[in-house]
Amino acid sequence: MPEARRFELAMSPHVSATATTRRVMTDVCIALLPALAAAVFFFGFRVLLLTGLSVMAAVAAEFLCLRFMKKPVNVVLDGSAVVTGILLAYNVPPGVPWWLPVLGSSFAIVVAKQAFGGLGNNIVNPALLGRAFLMASFPVLMTAGWWAPLAKGPSGNDSWDQSGMPSADLMEADVMTGATPLNLLKQTYTWDAGAAEALEGGDGDGAAALREKASEVRAMLSSGQTRLSLLLGRVGGCIGETSALMLILGALYLFARKVLEPRLPLSYLGAVALFGWLFGGPGFFRGDPLFHLLSGGVILGGFFMVTDMVTTPVTKKGRIIFGVGAGILTMVIRRWGGYPEGCSYSILLMNLATPLIDRYTKPLAFGEVRKNG
Amino acid sequence: MSRVRSFSGGTHPPGNKELSRSREIVRIPSPDTVTVSLCQHLGAPSTPVVKPGDTVTFGQVIGERNGFISLPTHSPVSGKVLSVGEAPMPHRRTGPAVVIAVTDREESPVFEPWPDWRNRQASLIIDRIRDAGVCGMGGACFPTFVKLSPPQGRKIDMLIINGVECEPYLTADHRLMLENPSDVIEGMNILAMVLGVVDPCIGIEVNKPDAITILRNAGARVVPLAVSYPQGAEKQLIDAVCGRRVPAGGLPLDIGVVVQNVGTCAAVAHAVRDGIPSVSRITTVTGRGVAVPGNFHCVVGTPVSVLVEAAGGYTPEAERLVSGGPMMGMAMYTDEAPVTKGTSGILVLSGAEVRDSAEGPCIRCGKCVDVCPINLCPSLIAKASEYGNWAMANDFGALNCMACGTCSFVCPAGRYLVHYIKRAQNEIRAAARSGKGA
């Protein structure tokens, strides 16, 4: 008599949607490619080398960690290390030595990710912690490596000045302490403060001169031409953050693929615009929200790092709190902090609050009534 | 045309209903032996009242009710009892059952047929529905008479008939509505009369336009619903049809609603109008693991292997055997288990259809939170459960989960979220039973 057929038992459901972690990560990589194309166009082929090295270092670091911890090494193929490698490279200036992104992405993987238990268990965004590590350890390299866009580009065109702003000749040579639009903005805050001080000291003329200088730079930063430069990526900045247009293009792809959910990016960008307008200018309600959105790392951060799944809340309400909180912190650092840009630190700080946010934004279950008192 | 209604949350798994949707219901004669489970309903199993060697006739009670939430079990055939004891079951390893050697397949009324049921007392009709062993045919198998006996002072003003059949692959309810709309409507009218509801309605998803048309033409009030899983879940269906929300931990009775499946309606009609107890059902045998998927009418106790044979047998790709649909159905280890009143489908999935069993770490993408129809955070409950933190799992509302599987379905990491949550539910309930908690 033949043995009765035995079937394998398994928990329901017995079918699943086609999305996998690997596909999610692949989609994110694809969405990041347009910005890389813009970076190559504006900064030259060296950015490809830096990004490639960063990715390779991240993957190698992940592989070695898994090997060392005797975990299955095929996990390295889930694509998350590639995303970290790309994002780390996108967060360094194009002029840094080749070993800097290698060190940064290795740190990101080993310390920020694997030491906390690997994918899904890291508390903060690995790429951003890698960047913070580089900023703390190599501050000069990380802030002096700005390249004027196109100056070293494939076209050899060097008609753009260091800031990439066509009307920067408005400024005297000593003004050019920074080479990104945000450095210039930060400078205007200093001048405003200097003007107030001068006025207190009775130097009315000096105050007026400083004020005028600040408002000229502001007018230049808010000009249509600057906006166009910011949109295209024709400004100084980190490798992957300058071209708002290309980043938005990638984000649209992710929305279409249903990888991105809208609450995180929209609440973050909304908060940056609102608080940029509120206190990002010379006085209250005089900031330029569009400038704050398009400059620095806000678009890159808003669509690719505020939205990092692992380190942000899972509750719907929590995602909005996270986005708004990061947006406020970004603007606070830009306006009053020690750095011209606050995007990455604001996200890192909010990452730390994520478990707490999840805890306190537990949604009401279907048919559940909020208890009074 | 009115707006198509639905509930919040949910997802759209591929229907795969085309495999069996157009297949007419085929009546399979009962096999030579049937294995009748004594636990076909939710509640206490019935107590066997026959012993090996006894002769039984069609519709004879072989298991008696055991407590309030319990039902009698009837013999679906005439024959001789071979054994009374444990047998393989679809929802567990084994369960109490009566095995009968069939001598006669003739069906005849066991109770007095009441074609004039409108003149009968409501309480007598409820007793009839109970004594005929009618339970929810949608899969939950809750004794129907209990739902018809609301506590004193509770007014029921709405009866919703569940024709949603939101589980992918299954088409048994769809075929029933197409081929036998009059029984469905008769049962609905009986239930409405008993409950004192004046305007009952049938909720059907718009992926079954033919069923909507047929039932409308037959005079029923149909509420078309957008296609979304799990719309056939009682609370989601009520929300979709009338916008009322059953309180968490409560019952539809609490908000004056009773929901009954279309198959249950047909069983009620047979019990009340025809005097036939609930001893058979329509079930879909489908999946790419069977050669010719179809819909079959068979007596309870028919081994699953007989149904698979009727569907052309296994294909070489057959890999998993499931009782019910792919989202909430239970995997079976053997096709020796019999059909019960709750067997809405027998699914034989091919290797290509079955989900990948590999499980990755949670990447906290929040997709499970977005789709949960109960508005829970499945990933967080699962994580708490994984680490044995039952208190935290409870705090995140684990007990509200109905195990619809929507979260596990969408999870890109392939996590068995339902498994973790059910584990937490068991532990939380066990702790509550043991008194002080763990």
Image (cartoon, coloured by chain):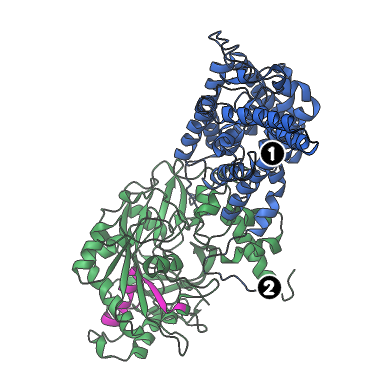
Chain colours: A blue, B green
Picture quadrant where residue A173 is located: top right
Residue B279 horizontal side relative to residue A266, left or right: left
Please name the amino acid that badge 1 sits on. Arg
User: Could you tell me if the residues under marks 2 and 1 are in contact, i.e. CB atoms within 8 Å?
Assistant: no
Q: Is residue A130 visible?
A: no
Q: Would residue A343 be found to the left or right of residue B161 on screen?
A: right
Q: Give yes or no for residue B264 being in the magenta stretch.
A: yes
The chain letter for the residue carrying disc 1 is A
x, y percent for residue A82:
62, 28
- How far apart in space, not on screen, are marks 2 and 1 (Cα)? 54 Å
**Dot 2 amino acid type:** Ala
Q: Residue at x 60, y 66 (%)?
A: B399
A155 in relation to A183, above or below = above
Q: Give the residue at the far left of this rendering.
A: B217
Q: Is residue A350 above or below residue B123?
A: above
Q: Residue at x 63, y 39 (%)?
A: A281
Quick one: B69 or B401, which is closer to the camera? B401
Mark 2 highlights which residue?
Answer: B432
Dots 2 and 1 on the same chain: no
Residue A85 location in percent, x, y? Answer: 65, 27
Report the number of numbered marks.
Answer: 2
**Magenta highlight on residue A246:** no
Quarter of the picture containing the C terminus of chain B is bottom right
Question: Which residue was labeled with disc 1?
Answer: A335
At a point 48% along the width and 61% down the height, the residue shown is: B90
Q: Is residue A147 shown left or right of residue B371?
A: right
Residue B59, quarter of picture:
bottom left
User: Magenta stretch?
Assistant: B255-280
Side of B36 where A9 appears, left or right: right
Q: Residues within 10 Å of mark 2 (few under 14, many from 20)?
A: few
